[in-house]
Image (cartoon, rainbow, N blue to C red):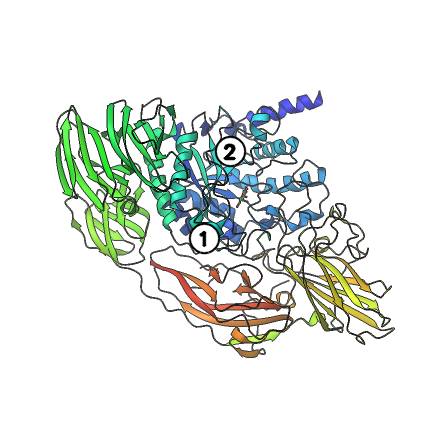
Amino acid sequence: MLRKVLTVLVTLLVLLPMPLRDPAVAAAAPRVTYDHHSLMIDGRRVVVQAAEVHYFRLPSPGLWRDVLEKIRAGGFNAISVYFDWAYHSPKPGVYDFTGVRDVDRFLRTAERAGLYVIARPGPYINAETTGGGFPGWLKNVPGRARSSDAGFTEAYRDWLHHINPIIARHQVGHGGSVILYNAENEYAVSTDAAYMQDIQDQARADGVDVPITTNDCCDAGSWSSTWAEGPGAVQIPGVDDYPQSFDCANAETVWGPWGEGTTERLRDDAPVFAAEYQAGAIDGNDAGYDRCRELTGPAYMKYFYKSNLLVSGATLFNYYMGFGGTNWGFLAQPNDVYTSYDYGAAVTEARGLTAKYDEFKRQGYFLQAVAPLAKTDPTAAPTTDNPAIGVVARANPDTGTRFALVRHADRAATTADTATLSWTVPDGTYSLPVQVKGRDAHVLVGGYDMGGQRLAASSSEILTHAFVGGRDVAVLYGTAGSTGATILRYSAKPRVTVLEGDVRSTYSDGNLRLDYTHERLARVLITGGGRRPLLLLLGTDETAATFWRTGTDAEPVLVRGTSLVRSTAVDGGTVRLAADTAEAGEVEVFAEASRLRVGDAEVRVTRTPSGSLLGRVPGPREVRLPALRGWRVRDETPEATPGFDDSSWRRADKTTTESPMKPPMKPEPGPVLYADDYGFHYGDVWYRGRFTATGAETAVALNAITGRRGRYLVWLDGRYLGSAAGGTEADADAGTPDPGPGRFAIPAGLLKPGRQATLAVLVQNMGHNDDWTADDNRFKQPRGLVAAAVEGSAASIAWKIQGARGGEDLPDPVRGPLNTGGLYGERSGWHLPGYPDRSWDEAGSPADRPLAPGVTWYRTGFRLDLPEGQDVSVGLRFGGDIPAAARVVVYLNGWNVGQYGGGIGPQKEFVLPAGLLREHGRNTLALALTATERASGGPGPIGLFAYGNVRGGVTVPDVPAPSYPLAR
Ligand code: GAL
């Protein structure tokens, strides 16, 4: 009974649109509503086209604006954002939302850029982040994560009560642009309905009043069909689809191995929601992200995205990822990713725009311009005279507008085929030529009130249309070389002037028919006929992508040319563009204006026969980046020497742990050595173990878990014994207690009877596993040593442990918990600007300084003064091939911007983001190189380079962060 009452109460809470806390607010009508077809914002239907973006993968708030403006200009009207618990919380009860963690600022920036937000605070997020977003300290909390167990409940509620109020104050109707709240993440196995429900109850109690969603996976449907009315059910369930798989290495041949990719409808009273639709890939096989971009390139986007739109009728889309960014610091989950999280996304990690961006723009502009798309039902498709071409159609029941998807009937076909469609739309029946060339798809529109025009039918696709300068301007496009026809309705014969290109027109029975071939950009001016004038621009995929649509609904501006138009303003006859240019070229503007300014500069323009303004804009000035010279070098690893003072280290003598992987692991029972149990969650960890020797010892047998691609190094009495690969998985109960074994022979005579011997072990921590299975078995895998023994010895070993300085009490909260590990140099501030390295040796170049086991640091500085009003995206490139025995942590001005090494992924170039990079000042680079063997080659040549250089960009303030020495 009690349970029933609770359930009713809980259900009431969920249904209440407003927080209970504020009765005044509770009276207001919800601003975000929905029905079977779409979301409505203030009663207006919207097709939500979101790009996934993670603020925590771009630690430079000034650049958030750059990326979000690019997303907006690329035809998106929304972003979807995970909030990463681990990124904000170094310690139970401690949260930080300042500086690079200032999510208030991020949400404000999104709103200013004109983007709605789908907020995804987890508590579990996956996202290839360390622990799937769970903080390291959560491994020490009793109770199964992602369940309603008491310990976990207390922990996640604390997180939600910190993040929810921030999200709540940025909702639509509260001064922001958050439109949806996503509870949990792909919560499909080992589920617990009470937990799923409680997340939603906490959100409501914290003032979240927008509809709640979740992203379902793996056909589980658990929070929708099965549970539709029960605890845990969400209002708008969505589905994650990755039809193209993550097989970037075989980008040319892979074609939809993971399904049709048409998003399933999960509830009849809610729109179809593609909660995560594949727009890039994890690079688990080290193919490199350019291959992932190929795997998910324009052909895939056209076929799958357009199919999804027309087959499933989805009106809520989130593309994962729009901009991937960087796993800076120790943010990466070790199994699937490395430092770069570029993801093969439309906007690259270095903030460059790609061919995928162009395709998003073509599709996104269409979705934004053609309102009837927000409400469609399946309808009879046009007939085709070629069975190789299949057609599917939908119609808006209110306006009668028709949409037809034209693509190969056989999904795998790569041929070029043509057909004639016979299409009955409200205006009549029309015959249209269509062509599908290879893997492609087109969405055709019929029966559409296009501004002041009536588009009966067209075999060209609509990019956008706008009422500018007293007439409609519409941009249509098709595959270069293909035949096109467009039919417009008039009450009398209009006047047709072909301004450019080869377009034939005929008129009969109110139908003006234009026939043409899609090539370059044809221009047709149509006046009279009982309608306001129309300028029709007929282009190809390529020329369509050169257009930008900005401004407001009331004052739209269309621009052709430049590399990016961020925004426009029309003021007293002058149109101002905030634009980026990668090279000098034409700019053409359709606006209610006679003068043009781009950035700060006036541009001389002429008026074209199309009524637009035409001018030329300059490209960027060339930039020379300095060579990296004056390196200084210092070996560290003092921990390996027997006399090292470890009196301040923590004793590792715990006998119990919250980890479900209980000792004993092989080879011997002993104390709990797991690093997390001692508060060291990220980066390298040192152990020192003392025992009394007899001289009969033969070998050291160790076992460690590092996560994929991690290693550990072993010294005995200062003598290097070697290294071994750390493990990823252990489960003593399941009979796999031997995750990362290493056996190291002890040289005869090294240990003296009766004398104390000192073992020193450096264990890398590549990050924490995710918790995808929601059963603690992956996430709570230990890190660090899990077992140790000295063969031939009965003596017990007294262990001490040392990790990142301060453990959970951060000495540098600005750079945060994920920035440094427990290397001697990291603990001593050698990575920081201002560290006095004058006493270090001069290294010349670290390029080929021989490697020796242990850790060596390199430092240098360089000065930049990049041109104002330009955006130079700077990177660090390692040339040559680093020996497999070496890996490097790269620090830029104290920020850990990457890990480079033969054994840890294909990455050789690292983004140095403006903001962390002082664009006008002195920069410090520090490299911590760990080698596991002697080798003759060093890390290879190291230099700066530019990923891109444009005139324009945004102003990026330096991110303030402490120099050496840290205060605590
Ligand atoms: C999804 C998950 C995301 C991300 C993605 C792969 O299953 O929800 O967080 O991990 O896969 O990149």
* Image quarter of residue 402: top left
Looking at the rendered image, the quarter that the N terminus falls into is top right
Q: What's under tag 2, amino acid-wise?
A: Gly
Q: What's under tag 1, amino acid-wise?
A: Arg
SS at mark 2 in the image: strand
* Image quarter of residue 351: bottom left
> Residue 146 at x, y = what percent?
65, 39
> Residue 769 at x, y = what percent?
63, 49
Of residue 543 and residue 299, the one placed in the foreground of this image is: 299
Q: Which residue is mark 1?
A: 291
Residue 176 can be seen, yes or no: no
Residue 182: numbered disc: none
Query: Hey, which residue is sitting farthest top in the picture?
Result: 1
Label 1 Cα neighbours within 10 Å, binned few <14 / some 14-19 / many ≥20: many
Q: Which residue is mark 2?
A: 238
Q: Is residue 708 left or right of residue 103?
A: right
Which residue is drawn at the image coordinates 26% and 28% (left, top)?
A: 449
